[in-house]
Image (spheres, rainbow, N blue to C red):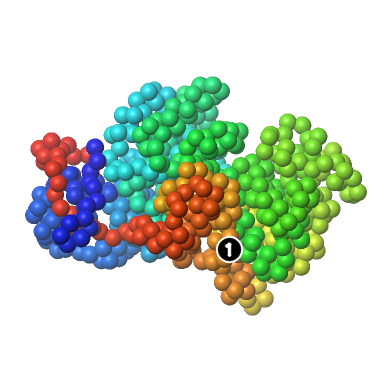
Amino acid sequence: MKSYNLKIDPQTTEQFLEVYYRGEQLLYNPLLNKGSAFTEEERLNLGLTGFLRSSVSDINAQRKRSYEMYRRSQDDMDKYSFLQSLLNRNETLFYNLLSHHLEEMLPIVYTPTVGTACQMLSHITKDFRGIYINPDNISNIDQLFEDTPLPLINLIVATDGERILGLGDLGSDGMGIPIGKINLYVAAGGVNPGCCLPVTLDVGTNNENLLNDPLYMGYRKRRLEGQAYDDFIERFVVGICRNFPNALLQWEDFAKHKAFKLLERYHNRILSFNDDIQGTGAAVAAALMTGMRIKKQGFRDQRFVIVGMGQAGSGIATSILSILMEEGISKEEAHSKIFCCDFPGLLMEDTPKLEEAQIAFAQKRSAVAQWKLSNPNNITLLDVVKNSKASVLIGVTATTGLFNSEILTLMAKNDERPIIFALSNPTSKSECTSEQVARATHGRGLFAAGSPFAPVDYEGRKIYTSQCNNMFIFPGMGLGALVSRATKITHKMFIAASKAVSAFVTDEQCKQNMLLPDLCNIRQVSLKVAKAISIEARDSGLARRLSDDEFETILTKAQWRPEYHSYRPGPGVSQSTYIRK
C-alpha cells in the first residue's frame, strides 16, 4: 500500500515523486498533499483540476498564511491542535513552518504542551496517526506493518504509555509522545518523515480515570504484566525484524522497571536505544562538558549529586562515570564522586529494595562515616549537599520546588560556580526556577532545565537558561545510525554525541552561561552528532567503512528538507475506488 516512490529521470537527472494516487486522494494524503502549490501541469496530470482554486502558491506563501492562522490561536492547546491538524493535512508544509519557527513552536509540539495534550488526547483526537498494537491485533502484526502507507520504514518510536513525561500512566493517550519525537527527528535531524512510524503498544492501563472515562479510546483493560507482557514485546520486536530489518527502534516513556529490562534484552538483537536513559544521559553530559570549559576544571574536580534514580538519573550517572574514567581515574574513585539520591534519601549499599541500576551507584557506609548526620539511617538531600560539598546538583524527580533556597544557598557556598540542573518536565514539575538559582548564587550559578525558562535580569545583565533537551542528541543519533548503517547503538556513541554537542557551543555563548547550543542551529548540531557517532560506530567495527569526509557528505545529502518535489503519475488506484475520509 505504498503511495509513492522517489525516482530520478535518467535523461535529466531530475528527482521526482512517482505517485500512485489521483484527485482527492492526493489532497487527503498528508505526505503527498501540496494544496495550492500543485502546479497547473500536476493538476492536469493527476486529476486535480477543479479541486483547487486557480492561484498557485509556493511553500513560502503557504507558510506565511499558516503562521498567520497559528498566531490567531487563543492558547497553547489551540496552537497544538492547529499544528496537529496541519501535520495531518500537509506534512511538508507543517515541517517547513516548524523549521522556520522551531524555538517558538518547540514548547507546543513537545514539552510542556504535549503533556497536556496527552492528558486530553481521547477528548481532542480528530485524526489518527501511526499504529496502535494491542493484545487483540498483535497476531496480525505483519498485516499491520504491511498496511502502513509509508514508502520505507526505517525509524520507529514506540511507547506503551506507562510513564508519560512526569504524568504517569496515560495508556494509549500517550501516542502524543512518539508523534512529537518524530516531529523532532524530522525538524531537528532531517530524517525523512516518510520513513518514520510512531507506535503505541496499547497493552491496557491501570489509570482508573481512563478506565472509567466513557470517551477513552484505548484498550480498556488493566495492563499486561509479567510473562504476557514479555511475550507481547517479543512478538512486536520480531515483527519489526521480519518486516523492517534495517529499522532503528527507539523505546520511549516505558516504566523504569521495564525500560532497563527491555534495553538490556534487545540492544544486541535490534538497532535500538532508550532515549529516557541514554539520550538524557548524553544531553546532560554535553551540558556538563561545557560547564567544565566555563569553570576551567575537569569532571574529576567535581562532586556530583543526582536526585531521582529512575531511567534519567541512571543514564546521567552512567555518563558521568564514563567521563570520569575517561579522564584517567579508577572506577572506584569515580564512584566516590557521584552521590545518588532517591525517595529513601542517599542510596547506600544497605538501602533495602534497590533496583539493579541503583545498586551500581549506591555508596558504601565507609564513604559517609565522617559526615555530620542527625539520622544516619535517613541521609537527606540537604545532608548530602552539605557533607559532600557538592559542586553539581542534578534533579530528575518531577518534584516541584525540591531545590529550595537552603539547598541552593549551600550550593553557592560549596563552589564558586555551582552547576544546577532542574530537568523535570513539564515546567510545573521543575525542581527550581532559573530566577531562584540566579538569586541564591548571586548570578554565578550555571543553570539548565528540562523545560524552557525565559532569561533572568540580574543586576543589569541577562542570565540565560539552556534547555537540556534530548533533542540535541537523539535526532542526530537516528540520522547517523541509519546513514552509517550501524548494527548496534553503544554507550561510546552517546559519549561521542555529547562531545559533538558541547563543541558546538561558542566561547561567546559560554560567557552568557549557555551550556548548550542555540536551538536555531539544531540541524547543524544534529549533523555534527550524526558524523561523530558514525565515526565512532565505524571505528568500533559496527558501521560502513567510509572516511570522515565521506560521512559528512552523505549525511548532509541525507538530511531531508521540507520542500516540495515535482510529481509524475504512476500506475495507481482509480478515482472510482477511492472513498473519502
Q: Position of residue 483 (x, y in %)?
A: 41, 52
Apparent side of residue 213 relative to residue 276 in the rendered image (left or right) = left
How many marks are shown on the rendered structure? 1
Seen at 77% across and 32% down, the residue is: 352
Q: Which residue is the site of mark 1?
A: 502
Please, is residue 40 above or below residue 146 in the view?
Answer: below
Apparent side of residue 9 relative to residue 131 in the rendered image (left or right) = left
Residue 284: which quarter of the image? bottom right
Question: Can residue 283 be seen at all in this image of the molecule?
Answer: no
Q: Position of residue 508 (x, y in %)?
A: 58, 75
Q: Out of 530 and 353, give the one closest to the viewer.
A: 530
Apparent side of residue 102 relative to residue 255 in the rendered image (left or right) = left
Secondary structure at badge 1 equals helix
Seen at 71% across and 69% down, the residue is: 296
Seen at 9% across and 53% down, the residue is: 45
Q: Quadrant of the N terminus?
A: top left
Q: Position of residue 3 (x, y in %)?
A: 23, 43
Please, is residue 241 above or below residue 27 in the view?
Answer: above
Q: Out of 137 and 383, give the one closest to the viewer.
A: 137
Question: Can residue 130 be seen at all in this image of the molecule?
Answer: yes
Residue 167: which quarter of the image? top right
At label 1, the amino acid type is Ser
Q: Position of residue 230 (x, y in %)?
A: 52, 26
Q: Out of 191 and 271, give the one closest to the viewer.
A: 271
Q: Quadrant of the C terminus?
A: top left
Seen at 27% across and 48% down, the residue is: 30
